[in-house]
Image (spheres, helix red, strand yellow):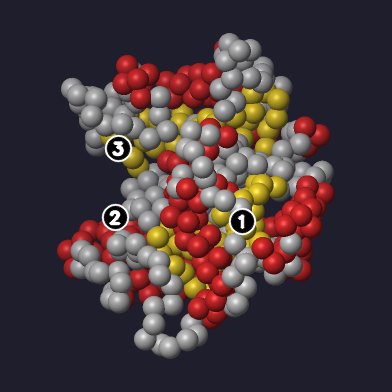
Amino acid sequence: MALDRKSVPNDLSAFWMPFTANRQFKQAPRLLVGADGMWYKTHDGRDVLDGTAGLWCCNAGHNRPKITEAIRQQAGELDYAPAFQMSHPKAFELASALRDMAPDGIDHAFFTNSGSESVETALKIAIAYHRARGEGTRTRLIGREKGYHGVNFGGISVGGLVNNRKFFGTLLNGVDHLPHTQLAENAFTKGVPEHGAYLADDLERKIALHGADTIAAVIVEPVAGSAGVIMPPKGYLEKLRKITREHGILLIFDEVITGFGRTGAAFGADTFGIQPDMMTTAKGLTNGVIPMGAVLVSGDIHDTFMTGPDHMIELFHGYTYSGNPMAAAAGLATLETYREEDLFTRAADMAPYWEEALHSLRDCRHVIDIRNIGLIGAIELEPMAGEPTKRAFNAFLQAYEKGILIRTTGDIIAMSPPLIIEKEHIDQLVGTLRDVLTTLD
Ligand code: PMP
């Protein structure tokens, strides 16, 4: 990369950074000033190997010419088009491309700008869908402990990460949570664990308690990402699908992380062989380059709205930037890149090497679990006495100093590299992590 050393701005005070310990960060900032392929360039001139695809989003790696060129061209051609009662060709082309990529039966796309907005949109569609069918009593939503569904009020209500909820007052009414699926007896399982399908039976109890005719939807991540890469036990998602179908409840897969090749197929739905009614997506949809999300919806749901007088707006919902031209151009170029380079197959082919490399860390100090599927993985550390989350965060800091970017959540190190990763990159990631774990307090 041609980029040279860049200094830190003089004034860091105005920017209130998201999900960041601001005061600590500003004492020792970590700024990125360039990116190419598998690598970031830091403000102090170092190359850092991207073990996280940015924030689980740059699945094709960085600075992909096809994507940047598509954005450049689009910017010079049509910078913005009103999103309501108007549109532009690429939004339709991208929706069609998503339909072609999605599992059979999922055939419409509603565009948003982020994962959080995709979640809000899907929850609203679920409730409005039942109402449109004359079942307006179905308004309850069911999420899962440790689930992450973005940070808006609907998403934190169905979400199950305590810190993301507890500071924000009264959340949505009528929300329940299934138990999470992280079981001690599954520790160090490679791929999908054996035990825990029974955890889905809790849905039957919720139905017995409230009545199916009050429940609109169940939302889960096929693999819970932000909570630390928690797998669905064998048979668990099948059970959820069976129970929801029997009771007329919609099943929403939040595929914001698992979408676009992360689990070794286009979507988690494909990897696990389950057909949800809706899928929320974002991140890898545009390779993280321009904010965009999409809710992918079944024909049945879509067609339910397409009744009534045809001059009527069918769904009173949308965003100024839904299907934004630059985002749509980036999305089309991204999906083409995935297809041309067969990156989802590549992820599946590389997954066994990734799995073996990660599990080779099993005997390192502090490691109490390792989990993986496709090109995603997590290493769980024993919490430091009295200071939970500190050990993993120290690992992140040391790893960054030693030239690899990992992510931590609580006491868990999570990794989700770009799908273009080579074996030598995996060796470097895991080798550096081994060094870090060896010296970590
Ligand atoms: N859902 C899931 C499963 C996610 O992992 C995320 C982000 N990590 C979101 C929703 C929210 O996406 P965003 O940050 O784009 O709003």
Q: Is mark 3 within 8 Å of ligand 1?
A: no
Which of the pair 171/400 is nearer the observer? 171
Q: Tell which circle, 1 or 2, labels the residue nearer the N-terminal end.
A: 2
Name the residue that disc number 2 marks.
68
Q: Is mark 2 within 8 Å of ligand 1?
A: no
Q: Is mark 1 within 8 Å of ligand 1?
A: no
* Picture layout, residue 106 above or below residue 141: below
- Locate the N terminus and report the quarter of the image it occupies: top left
Q: Amino acid at mark 1?
A: Leu
73 to the left or right of 142: left
Q: Residues within 10 Å of mark 2 (few under 14, many from 20)?
A: some
Looking at the image, which residue is at 42% across and 20% down? Answer: 401
- Image marks 3 and 1: residues in contact by CB distance under 8 Å: no
The secondary structure type at the circle numbered 2 is helix
Query: Whole-percent x and y of residue 164?
Result: 51, 37
Q: Amino acid at mark 3?
A: Gly
Name the residue that disc number 1 marks.
141
User: Looking at the image, can residue 179 be seen?
Assistant: yes
Query: Whole-percent x and y of residue 222?
Result: 64, 52
Which of the pair 32/316 is nearer the observer? 316
Name the residue that disc number 3 marks.
34
Which of the pair 432/204 is nearer the observer? 204
